[in-house]
Image (spheres, coloured by chain):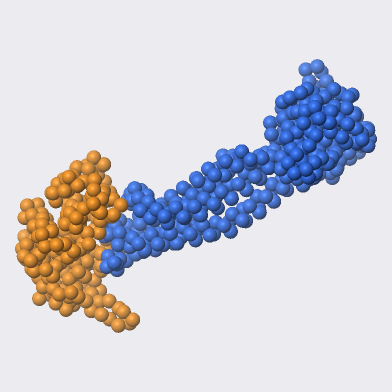
Amino acid sequence: MAIPLKYSIRSLLARRMTMILTVFGITLVVFVFTAVLMLATGLQKTLVGSGIDENAIVIRESSNTEIQSFITRYQAGVIQTLPDIALNADGQSMVTGEVVALISKNRRDNSRPGNIMVRGIQPMSLSVHKDINLTSGRIFEFGQTEIIVGKRIAERFQGCGLGETVTFGMTDWKVVGIFETGGSSFESEIWGDVEQFLPALGRPVFSSMTFRLKDPAQFSQVRDRVKSDPRMTVDLKREKQYYDDQSRQTATFIRVLGIVISVVFSLGAIIGAMITMYAAVANRTREIATMRALGFQRPSILLGFLTESIVISLVGGALGLLAASSLQLLRVSTINWDTFSDLTFDFALTPNIVVTVIIFSLIMGLLGGFLPAVRASRIKIIEALRAE
Amino acid sequence: MPAIVKISNLSKSYRRDSIRIPVLENINLEVEAGDFLALMGPSGSGKTTLLNMIGGIDKPSAGDVFVGDVPIHRLSDAALATWRARHVGFVFQFYNLMPVLTAFENVELPLLLTRLSKTERRKHVELALSIVGLQDRINHYPRQLSGGQEQRVAIARALVTDPTLILADEPTGDLDKNSAEEVMTLLSQLNSQHGKTIIVVTHDPRAADKARSHRNLDKGELA
């Protein structure tokens, strides 16, 4: 039979200050750990959210990103006639050729320059890409020097607000609309007419082609067929996979660095919990001996003390998680190391992170409490009953 | 009355830095069921050690200890713990109550090792606390009780499981004269009115007066 939980909890509360300090240590570690996971997940979510499984993206073979890629007009023509492209309600092929480039603009907050991705699109792009919503203004007119700006760029860069003018490619582009895309990386871009952008940017060709698959399950066959065509020195990826690959490097870097830091910090917290629990065992030697004399078995004593350290770690974990969850209100800006463009994203707390953090806290509690609990369970009744 | 405790040829010694220190030598003792025995003797005579052997919290170096028909000297550590929970109620000199538990919860503690339901446990605890006269202190923590009251809670804890034996080690050692008198009277009543077999270790002759039989230990040997 286990020692009653109320005994464990009240014993912890009886040493309030020690417990608060130990909990605080664990809270800090869990906060850092959670923040890092939220950062990596937020980055990944923003990039991966740009793509959908039903779309395929075509880029030049051995290019990792659109920014390094080009698709010739001839290749674009071949892709546009693929029989695997879905048709919209008007019977038009859902395929679009786009050009991307980087421009430099000053930030609103510190006037320092940052790179912005500009994307020249075709009318079909608005149907092929998902969840494009104008929050203000209107869509640009094709054939005009007008642009729409992703809301995160509009917020953060000078001259990018509605009604303002952005200059690049020796042309003044009027911002006629602000758009959002449900938090994806498109919100960190400027969009305009591809036929206007190509000459302005001095590009003769598209950077990429994106099309909606008639049957998404047939992606592998479509890819194999296109790649086996000797005219097509291109790569095909599911759009979601493309953005996932882009996010992986940076997200993995953040995650690994964060986990290493958290593990090092957690050693301190574990030692803190261990000292607290050793002190608890030392202070309650006679109580432990009495329990043993009454008939409680060694494993019950072990479990009782382990429960105390787990309670400490779970309370610390919950507080750390709570504190970290407030980071969702913050917006972070970083460079996308694959495209070198400025990317803005939010800290994202997911159920996966919550579970990971709870397990992490639990492990800290178990490691910190195990040795003291073993000591408690091995106390010799006779000697302990004599203890002052 | 049949003997409930049978000790034969019991010896106990400790080793300290390779030196053997004898504590008990060749002890033979029988305690009848329903007896109230006072084990007396000066400090260091081995009376607490003998009590611990009977209670199964210490093991002899040689000899046998039977309680009922159980050879407790042969039981494993885990089996002894189970046996203690069923058959022994301990009363300690410094009460040894859990400071974070109320009187009720302290008395309930040994019942958690039984299969009694919550309602049954409550009945047993209330009965035990009423026997020791503390039914109105049920929700008090040990720090809110006097020394005598704490010891009475400890006695309630010892008797709540209706054990075969109640073993008390210097139960009046930390109490003033009046409280000591109350505690010994209470133990005496448990013996006479409830038929409990009680062994008390004490070096206080006034406390020992309440017992029915007396044995003296001196330098590890029973007189």
Residue A233 x, y percent position in the rendering = 89, 40
Residue A247 visible in the snapshot = no
Residue B1 visible in the snapshot = yes
Q: Nearer the viewer, residue A47 or A202?
A: A202
Indicate the colour of chain B.
orange
Q: Nearer the viewer, residue A105 or A193?
A: A105
Indicate the colour of chain A.
blue
Query: In percent of the image, x 78 and y 43: which residue is there?
Result: A111
Q: Residue furthest bottom?
A: B19
Query: In percent of the image, x 11 and y 68: which residue is there?
Result: B204
Q: Please determine whether, in this image, residue A141 is positioned above or below residue A184.
A: above
Query: In percent of the image, x 49 and y 52: which residue is there?
Result: A24
To which quarter of the image does residue B93 belong?
Answer: bottom left
Residue A214 x, y percent position in the rendering = 77, 26
Tell me how many marks there are: 0
Query: In percent of the image, x 90 and y 28: which residue is there?
Result: A195
